[in-house]
Image (cartoon, helix red, strand yellow):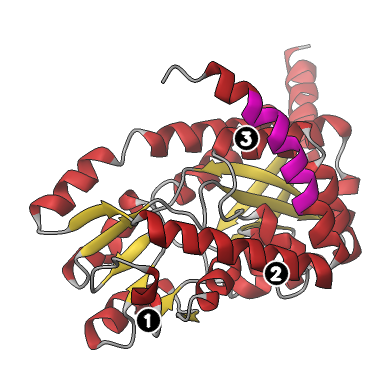
Amino acid sequence: MKHTLKAAALAVLASTAAQADSYTMQSAFGPLPVLDPAAKRFVENVSTLTGGEVDFDYLLAGELSPAFEIFDNVSAGAIDAGFSFAGYAAGKEPAAALFGSIPFGGEPTQYISWLNHGGGLELWREIYEPYNLVPMACGVILSEAGGWYTKEINSPEDLKGLNIRIGGLGGAILSKLGANAMSLPAGEISTSLETGRLDATELSFPLVDKLLGFDKVAKNYYFPGWHQPAGFIEFYMNKDKWDALTDPQRKAIEISCNEVSLWALGHAAGAQGPILDEFREKGVNVARFPDSVMDALRAAADEVYAERSAEDEMFKRVIESYRAYGEDYREYQALSDLQ
């Protein structure tokens, strides 16, 4: 009888193992703070919630596909899932940029609330549907810094002619004020600042910026991060692979992403102050952009939004959806403000 029970147990284990599926998940990021731990946390959560039935093989940037090619490779099914930034798909779909960040948009709570309760997710999935992808937010990102500058910015005129590493909508906005927006890999930024190829750069918040050594070559660190007051890490999966999952497995992925969103925001929010103190000790001028600069950037942003909305119907639908949700959201926040 014992031998029979043992054989039955082994059969059950073999059956369970046979049901487990492994999926490749390519990240667009290297081993950076917040982003890398968030991806690992997501993978662990999914495996735990599915009892090991769904395991993602997590790969860092460049290990399988270049960052900007992940979208196409997951679309084609060559990679099962991506862990990326929606702004990278803006060349294909301009409205995708609005699911990476919204310049002069609201803070993180407004952003994720709109996504999950204001129709944002439905629009995002509509945009990605022709590409055979199912997207969702899988990490909410704290407001970024406004950027590192090799000289002080005292007026909008100081932006004219500056070579700055910034992409997407932020780059288009700065271009309106005469800056030269450039795209560069993160690994080339410090050298480009040191040699004068760049006059300024934005990348992330202090915890991440510290790793790149920007404080050694640029001594003016400006806030706020008007170009990304909040951001999303995105997870997307090939739709054929997504549809082949069971309902509980899909739910486990969604729950895991929601948990990672809360974790990422809380982790980043409490880690920036000590880094800013370190920068100040090294002679970095940590300051806010002057009001005149912020006013000029906001006016330029309005121009860019109007132009993109006229050019692309989906862009118009997304930004109008976000703004409509924001009106109701901000009214209650204003009434609740203790200041």
Give the labeled residue for mark 1.
Answer: 162
Q: Which of 246 and 28 is in front in this view?
A: 28
Looking at the image, tell me whether mark 3 or mark 1 is earlier in sequence order: 3
Residue 293, by quadrant, is bottom left
Residue 332 is situated, as x and y percent measured from the top left of the image, at 63, 21
Q: Distance between the residues labelled 1 and 2?
A: 24 Å
Residue 43 is situated, as x and y percent measured from the top left of the image, at 60, 42
Mainly helix, strand or loop, the magenta region?
A: helix
- Give amino acid for label 2: Ala
Secondary structure of residue under mark 2 = loop
Q: Which residue is painted at 57% across and 67% down in the image?
A: 300
Secondary structure of residue under mark 3 = helix
Give the labeled residue for mark 3.
Answer: 110
49, above or below 86, in the image: above
Give the labeled residue for mark 2.
Answer: 90
Observer able to see residue 156: yes
- Give amino acid for label 1: Leu
Residue 325 colored in magenta in the image: yes
Looking at the image, tell me whether mark 3 or mark 2 is earlier in sequence order: 2
Q: Could you say which disc has been placed on residue 128 in the image?
A: none
Q: Which of marks 1 and 2 is in front?
A: 1
Q: Nearer the viewer, residue 114 or 26?
A: 114
Q: How far apart are marks 3 and 2 (CA)?
A: 22 Å
The quadrant of the rendering that contains the N terminus is top right
Q: Nearer the viewer, residue 54 or 156?
A: 156
Q: Give the range drawn in magenta.
A: 319-331
Secondary structure of residue under mark 1 = loop
For the residues labelled 1 and 2, say whether their Cβ atoms are less than 8 Å apart.
no
**On the rendered structure, is 102 left or right of 159?**
right
